[in-house]
Amino acid sequence: MDATLYTNEGSFDSVVLRWIALEKECPIVIKTLVSSPRNTVRLPYFQDRGLALFDHNVVLQYLQERYPGEDLLPSDPQLRGQIRQICTLIRETESGESIVADLDSMLRGNEYLVGRDFSLADVYAGAWLQVNSALPKALPTRVFNYWKKLAARPAYKDALQ
């Protein structure tokens, strides 16, 4: 039985997990379900060899460990901690303006949020920018150009389809 990731349209968690699975070239089936009041399945939902995972972070860790593809977390513990902290900040901060200001600051002098390498923090930022693309205020040039660079990644494009 193929591993399957069930997601829903427009959900931050679903965009993150689809993008990660595609970035790592995981050999899994991705299905997008339509949310409805009658649908009692919690999404995103991942199933692999009899194992069912519901929590976004648990699925994320499972994909990182089970599928070796591109590693979105560096081996350096300090960088891993920094990336995880950025992911938590993006996921838990309610103020869109605050996140945009933080992204702008982190990108000052950096190609990506944590230096020169694409990482999990960039997946979170790109997913957040996509889900919140109707922000009332224009993005700072640095953040807008960064988002364009992320959007050019094939896995990003595929994750949104």
Image (tube, rainbow, N blue to C red):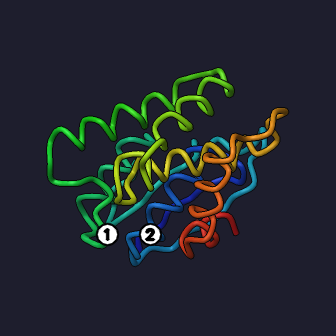
Place residue 34 in its image quadrant: bottom right
Extreme front residue here?
109
Q: Quadrant of the C terminus?
A: bottom right
Residue 1 visible (yes or no): no
Q: Amino acid at mark 1?
A: Glu
Q: Label 1: how many residues lie within 10 Å, few (<14), some (14-19) or many (20+)?
A: some
Q: Quadrant of the N terminus?
A: bottom left
Q: How far across and how far down the image is residue 147, in percent?
A: 62, 55
In this picture, is 113 found above or below 151?
above
Q: Amino acid at mark 2?
A: Glu
Q: Find numbered disc 2 in the image and state the secondary structure of the residue it sits on.
A: helix
Can you tell which mark lies on residue 23?
2
Q: How far across and how far down the image is residue 97, in percent?
A: 68, 25
- Residue at image location 82% in from the left, 41% down from the top: 134
Q: CA distance from mark 1 to mark 2?
A: 7 Å
Q: How far across and how far down the image is residue 59, in percent?
A: 38, 50
Of residue 28 and residue 78, the one placed in the foreground of this image is 78
In this picture, is 64 found above or below 53?
below
In this picture, is 47 found above or below 23?
above
Q: Tell whether 53 sits left or right of 5.
A: left
Q: Find numbered disc 1 in the image and state the secondary structure of the residue it sits on.
A: loop
Of residue 64 and residue 55, the one placed in the foreground of this image is 64
Can you tell which mark lies on residue 70?
1
- Asked if marks 1 and 2 touch (Cβ < 8 Å), the reply is yes
Can you tell which mark lies on residue 103?
none
- Residue at image location 27% in from the left, 53% down from the top: 73
Among the two numbered marks 1 and 2 on one chain, the one whose residue lies closer to the N terminus: 2
Residue 65 visible (yes or no): yes
Of residue 54 and residue 40, the one placed in the foreground of this image is 54
